[in-house]
Image: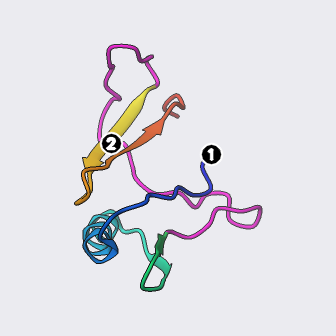
Amino acid sequence: MIDHVSITVPDPGAAMRFHDAVMAALGVPAAGRSERWAGYGLRADAAHPARCFGTDDGAPGLGLHDHPEYYAAVLRDPAGNRVEAVCNEAPR
């Protein structure tokens, strides 16, 4: 389980506008921000273990070097960073 990810960008304002839109579309709330950083999502913890974001809208696809439980969503931010979210857990 990932607790957080940091992405360095040359234009924080453009990155925040992009990620604000992406996270809003996913229903992920903003957790905090300043002029230099933004955070999204509510933390999963012992009291809230089910807090997670994103759902599978069908069977996971296979990649060249992947396995049957590999499911990924990929996007690029305004700085050209490739952002990939991967789940390696078998469907329940």
Count the numbered circles shown. 2
Q: Tell me which residue sits at (32%, 65%) in the image.
A: 10
Neighbour class for label 1 at 10 Å: few (<14), some, many (≥20)?
A: few
Circle 2 is placed at which residue position?
A: 73
Q: Tell me which residue sits at (29%, 78%) in the image.
A: 13
Q: Position of residue 12 (x, y in %)?
A: 34, 73
Viewer-proximal residue among 63 and 27: 63
Q: Position of residue 58 (x, y in %)?
A: 30, 35
Residue 88 position (above or below residue 9) = above
Most common secondary structure along the magenta stretch: loop
Outermost residue toward the right?
Answer: 46
Of helix, strand and loop, which one carries label 1?
Answer: loop
Of helix, strand and loop, which one carries label 2?
Answer: strand
Circle 1 is placed at which residue position?
A: 1
Magenta span of residues: 41-69
Residue 19: name its quadrant: bottom left
Q: Earlier in the sequence, mark 1 or mark 2?
A: 1
Residue 3 position (above or below residue 39) = above
Q: Position of residue 90 (x, y in %)?
A: 52, 28
Outermost residue toward the bottom?
Answer: 34
Q: Quadrant of the N terminus?
A: top right
Neighbour class for label 2 at 10 Å: few (<14), some, many (≥20)?
A: few
Q: Which mark is residue 25?
A: none
Residue type highlighted by circle 2 = Ala
Q: Is residue 69 left or right of residue 11?
A: right
From mark 1 to mark 2, how far is it between C-alphas?
16 Å
Residue type highlighted by circle 1 = Met
* Residue 68 inside the magenta-drawn segment: yes
